[in-house]
Image: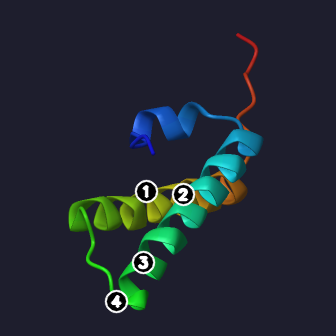
Amino acid sequence: MSILKLKEAREMPKENLDKKLSEIRLELAKELGKIRVGGVAENPGKIREMKKTIARILTIQSEKKKAPAKKAEPK
């Protein structure tokens, strides 16, 4: 899992953001599943970063829905 920077996420098209979001959620579910079975998290910081990345993507998606399309004004 690569960490998704804010600037990179803002420049990504909606389809790529959706795909990245589902990948990260799946990976987070796998990590949390390992812990629930009785295992130990190999890297607890990774779980925290995945949660932050999910929140980042969801925030950007909601911003894109709310923001009106910017139109170029003629000079």
Image spot of residue 25 (x, y percent)? 57, 65
Image spot of residue 26 (x, y percent)? 60, 64
Q: Depth check: 53 or 14 in front?
A: 53
- Amino acid at pointer 2: Ile
Mark number displayed over residue 24: 2
Of callouts 2 and 1, which one flags the residue occurring earlier in the amino acid sequence? Answer: 2
**Which residue: 53% across, 73% down?**
29
Mark number displayed over residue 34: 3
Badge 2 marks a residue whose secondary structure is helix
- Amino acid at pointer 1: Thr
Quarter-of-image position of residue 47: bottom left
- 44 up-or-down from 15: above or below: below
Q: Are marks 3 and 2 in contact (CB under 8 Å)?
A: no
Q: Are marks 1 and 4 in contact (CB under 8 Å)?
A: no
Lateral position of residue 36 relative to residue 20, left or right:
left
**Which residue: 54% across, 39% down?**
10
- Amino acid at pointer 3: Lys
Q: Which residue is mark 4?
A: 38
Task: Give the spatial CA distance, label 4 vs label 2.
Answer: 22 Å
